[in-house]
Image (cartoon, helix red, strand yellow):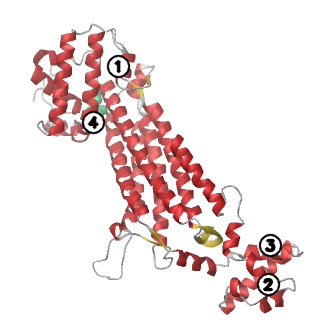
């Protein structure tokens, strides 16, 4: 096919070079944004008297026809075109003749591709945020259902203090709220229109960049045309928010994997989100959670690829920047897929409170409360801490737990022990007493749930 730029160069490019240069294989996913952007451009050109109103009408109708035909599958993307921008323009010109050639007045593919990417990505950000809200919703349902379920809380993966399952899940809700915040914030700087920057220097035509920006629902325009075509910060910010979100999903996945192991058995994942083994009949593998954990690496890679592509690039447009797309598209696809699996996996996850409670009881996680009991009875904390430690050691040696150790044994360590000690070291009581804001008591977690619901409603 004759090249758009035939005129400057006479020689044909090599086929391999053509393939190498081409981005249509992946940027075709932006055809809607490309066509919508062109419609606004045609309208602006007519409004400014750069083309005739009738010509704009024909262009807009022609573009609408291409959009319809692509949506219905009547028109197929020609992969021999260099990119989606060229493809649309070529089809338009083939269909409309000379009028089609007028569309590219007062713009360049440099501002066009930046425009398409921003429009594409802001739509995808909205989709990611909607999914994050659904995931938080699933966490809230689980938190409410497990308000009073006691489990061990860990530090160093060692049983530390009793908490509720609700409290633990709500920690993830808070992380995901911050993710929403990060994506929304990135979207603000994304929603700035570069169109009209043209190749880099602006244009001699009397364009109305604000009109075009408003038509396309942008809040602002790029104030410097060189920056307009060179800026890919919005991709970096998106990818960095994506990497952070994946890090959260990966930590959660890791816990789901641990919790569904025979060693923990704190939760059971639905059969729909686990797999069996081809050889070991007892196996129920948390593959989906493992894959989410695994896919985190590729999204980190997408971020690094983007940063590295931009590093040291001179202004303004360089072909290197075509490499922005596959990183962004891969992260978008991965995020959406991971969230789409994570949401129903959490919705259908079954907590196993008996096992959580048993693990909490075996961990001596009320040893601090036992020491506090002696302090309450008048003993200095350091002495109380020592006796509490000796009692734990006794229990370990004799296969006992503090909750059921006979009072006679307790009294062998200190005369201060009385029947009421059992109440103080009861795990339910330990949890109930942690009433500080953000703490693990059911009242505190109710307040956390109310907070998350409020942010979701007003945010
Ligand atoms: N396919 C190109 C890209 O994705 C479009 C911009 C081309 N501009 C240029 N001057 N060659 O970056």
Numbered badge on residue 419? 2
- Spatial CA span between label 1 and label 3: 68 Å
Q: Which residue is mark 4?
A: 30
Sequence-earlier tag: 3 or 4: 4
**Residue 303 appears left or right of 375:** left
| Ligand 1 has an atom within 8 Å of the beta carbon of the residue at disc 4 | no
Residue 269 is situated, as x and y percent measured from the top left of the image, at: 41, 69
The structure residue drawn at horizontal position 44% and vertical position 25%, both measured from the top left corner, is 219
Report crowding for label 1: few under 14, some 14 to 19, many 20 or more residues within 10 A (C-alpha).
Answer: many
Pick the residue in front: 281 or 61: 61
Q: Residue at x 21, y 41 (%)?
A: 25
Vertically, is 198 above or below 435?
above
Q: Secondary structure at mark 1?
A: helix
Find disc 1 in the rendering and name its residue: 212
Circle on res. 372: 3
For marks 1 and 2, give the CA distance. Answer: 78 Å
> Considering only vertical position in the picture, is 375 above or below 62?
below
């Amino acid at each position: 096919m004759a090249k758009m730029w035939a005129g400057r160069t006479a020689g044909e490019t090599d086929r391999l070079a053509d393939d190498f240069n081409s981005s249509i294989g992946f940027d075709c996913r932006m055809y809607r944004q490309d066509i919508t952007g062109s419609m606004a451009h045609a309208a602006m050109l007519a409004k400014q008297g750069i083309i005739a109103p009738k010509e704009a009408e024909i262009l807009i109708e022609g573009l609408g026809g291409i959009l319809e035909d692509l949506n219905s599958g009547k028109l197929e993307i020609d992969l021999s075109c260099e990119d989606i921008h060229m493809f649309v323009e070529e089809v338009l010109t083939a269909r409309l003749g000379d009028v089609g050639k007028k569309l590219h007045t007062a713009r360049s593919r440099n501002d066009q591709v930046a425009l398409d990417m921003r429009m594409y990505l802001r739509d995808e950000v909205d989709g990611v945020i909607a999914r994050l809200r659904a995931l938080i919703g699933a966490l809230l349902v689980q938190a409410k259902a497990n308000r009073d379920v006691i489990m061990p809380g860990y530090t160093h993966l060692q049983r530390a203090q009793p908490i509720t399952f609700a409290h633990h899940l709500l920690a993830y809700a808070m992380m995901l709220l911050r993710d929403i915040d990060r994506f929304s914030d990135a979207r603000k700087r994304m929603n700035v229109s570069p169109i009209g920057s043209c190749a880099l220097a602006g244009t001699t035509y009397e364009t109305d960049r604000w009109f075009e920006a408003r038509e396309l629902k942008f809040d602002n325009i790029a104030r410097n045309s060189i920056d307009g075509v060179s800026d890919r910060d919005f991709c970096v910010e998106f990818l960095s928010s994506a990497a952070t979100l994946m890090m959260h999903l990966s930590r959660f996945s890791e816990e789901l994997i641990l919790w569904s192991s025979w060693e923990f058995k704190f939760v059971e994942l639905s059969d729909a989100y686990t797999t069996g083994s081809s050889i070991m009949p007892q196996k129920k593998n948390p593959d989906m959670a493992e894959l989410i954990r695994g896919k985190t690496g590729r999204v980190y890679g997408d971020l690094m690829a983007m940063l590295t592509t931009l590093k040291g690039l001179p202004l303004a447009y360089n072909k290197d920047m075509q490499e922005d797309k596959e990183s962004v598209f891969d992260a978008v696809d991965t995020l959406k897929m991971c969230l789409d699996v994570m949401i129903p996996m959490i919705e259908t996850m079954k907590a196993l409170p008996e096992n959580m409670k048993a693990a909490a009881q075996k961990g001596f996680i009320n040893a601090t409360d036992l020491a506090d009991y002696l302090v309450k009875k008048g003993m200095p904390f350091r002495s109380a801490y020592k006796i509490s430690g000796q009692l734990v050691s006794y229990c370990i040696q004799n296969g006992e737990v503090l909750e059921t150790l006979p009072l006679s044994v307790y009294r062998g360590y200190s005369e201060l022990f009385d029947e009421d000690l059992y109440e103080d070291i009861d795990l339910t009581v330990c949890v109930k007493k942690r009433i500080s804001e953000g703490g693990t008591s059911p009242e505190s977690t109710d307040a956390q749930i109310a907070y998350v619901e409020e942010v979701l409603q007003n945010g």
